[in-house]
Image (spheres, rainbow, N blue to C red):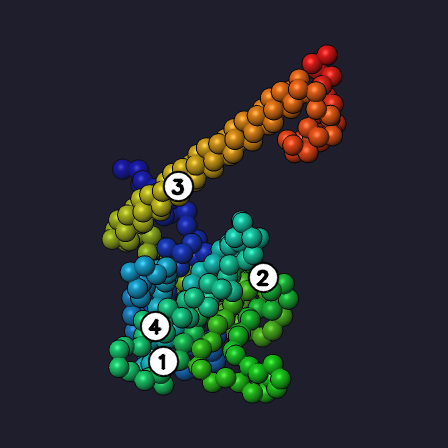
Amino acid sequence: MKKQFSNLDKLTLSNDFLFKHVMLRKRICKHILEELLHTEIADITYLEAEQTIEVYPDSHGIRLDVRIADTANTHYNLEMQVKNPVNRATGKFLLPKRTRYYQAMLDTDMLQKGQDYDELSPTYIIFFCLFDFFQDSQRIYTFKKRCLENMNIELADEAVIMFLNTLGTKGDVSPDIQSLFDYINSNTITSNFTREVADTIVEIKNDKKVRAAYMTYEMRMKDLRDEAHAEGLAEGKAQGLAEGKAEGLAEGKAKEKTATAKRLLSMGLSVEDIAKATSLSVEQVEKIKAEQI
């Protein structure tokens, strides 16, 4: 019997669905964190993969790809970012303020009622980016809060944001991290670690439960696209109606001014006086007068 292929078979690690499932393999995820942060991690636990946090019913929820905590109670949020999102209306890139919002929501969700602020866990928000957001060719951009007047003074809030630029050429990373970047960029296996990642992806794609989950995921993404398309059509229709209404009103006012000018001309008023009375230009009134002759 011929094997049936789905879109899942075509996915690479840069896809957020597949990325999430690979990061759910504890050995791989733990190794990536250790290589990135140059530290040993005893163990990690998954708080909830692809978790949607809505602190308040009317707040803007966020969907997290993978959220992890280690035995030292440090929390990690790992995200795959293929495109550099931009607000079409303003032309501003969204990624910096997205990290700000993610951090705020993580902290609010983490701190239970009655707890002190110092009970907030250290956090790392880590974006794997297939583009160089800061255009400086760094492999890793790490952000912590520092005093502008004295950069040696750090605000020790234990919140770190990291942008991993898979296209970067500057800065040192471990061989396994570089091989992971190469694998994300070109699907090329250059180390034992990326061989393990590639083998894991094959296992994931052959997992019946994952295939079923991907079908559900595809349907959900289609529903979201359809909703966005419908909203766009409705918005366009409403805008068209509004523009048509405004255009109609403007046309009606212009006709009204022309009719008033004609009546005033028939009464023998001067062109200058009619222009003042109707807010038309002298040239417009003269044109109306010429058409009546």
Mark 2: give few (<14), some (14-19) or many (20+) Cα within 10 Å: some
Mark 2 or mark 1: name the one nearer the start of the chain: 1
User: Closer to the camera: disc 4 or disc 1?
Assistant: 4
Q: Secondary structure at mark 2?
A: loop
Mark 4: give few (<14), some (14-19) or many (20+) Cα within 10 Å: some
Mark 3 or mark 4: name the one nearer the start of the chain: 4
> Do the numbered discs 2 and 4 sit on residues whose CB atoms are within 8 Å?
no
Q: CA distance from mark 1 to mark 3?
A: 39 Å
Picture residue at 54% right of the left edge, 49% below the top = 89
Q: Nearer the viewer, residue 263 or 109?
A: 263
Residue 128 position, x and y percent, is 48, 63
**Residue type, mark 2 in image:** Asp
Quadrant of the drawing holding the C terminus? top right
User: Closer to the camera: disc 2 or disc 1?
Assistant: 1
Q: Is residue 185 left or right of residue 202?
A: right
Q: CA distance from mark 3 to mark 2?
A: 32 Å
**Residue type, mark 4 in image:** Thr
- Res 106 visible: yes
Which residue is disc 1 drawn over? 121
Q: Is residue 35 left or right of residue 270?
A: left
- Residue 108 - label: 4
Q: Is residue 232 left or right of residue 186?
A: left
Which residue is disc 2 drawn over? 132
